[in-house]
């Protein structure tokens, strides 16, 4: 969780290397080291955030597309300890 009991979030905006549309898979990598969370999309660094509220917890992925109706399918989700 981030500050005030809300989840830590990264920057919002358009990701130019994200492939939109049906049958266009994207690789999203989330690397966590201590409090730093780094996000990569299709092998290219996107953004970082810091979350110093918890020492352990759960991980999730959420799609947000403003007011547009959107659907996402996730496959091959894996977690590694580095």
Image (cartoon, helix red, strand yellow):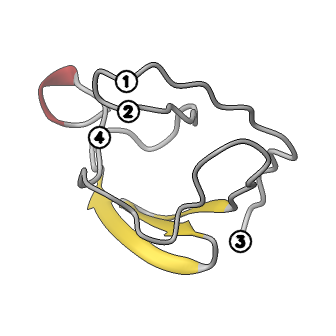
Nearer mark to the viewer, of 3 and 2: 2
Dots 2, 1 in contact, CB < 8 A: yes
Q: Measure how far apart labels 1 and 4 are at the Cα level.
A: 23 Å
Which SS class for mark 1?
A: loop
Dots 1, 3 in contact, CB < 8 A: no
Residue 56 left/right relative to 15: right
Lower position in the chain sequence, tag 3 or tag 4: 4
The residue that label 1 is drawn on is 68
In the current view of this chain or complex, which residue is farthest to the front? Answer: 21
Q: Measure how far apart labels 2 and 4 are at the Cα level.
A: 18 Å
Residue drawn 27% across the image and 50% down it: 52
Residue 66: quadrant of the picture = top left
The residue that label 2 is drawn on is 65
Q: Measure how far apart labels 1 and 3 are at the Cα level.
A: 36 Å
Residue 46 picture location, percent across and down: 40, 71
Nearer mark to the viewer, of 3 and 4: 4
Q: How many marks?
A: 4
Residue 69: quadrant of the picture = top left
The residue that label 3 is drawn on is 82
């Amino acid at each position: 969780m981030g500050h005030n009991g809300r989840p830590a979030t990264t920057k919002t905006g358009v990701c130019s290397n994200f492939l939109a549309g049906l049958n266009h898979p994207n690789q999203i990598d989330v690397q966590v080291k201590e409090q730093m969370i780094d996000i990569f999309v299709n092998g290219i660094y996107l953004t970082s955030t810091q979350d110093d509220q918890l020492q352990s917890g759960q991980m999730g992925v959420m799609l947000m597309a403003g007011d547009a109706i959107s659907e996402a399918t996730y496959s091959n989700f894996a977690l590694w300890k580095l």
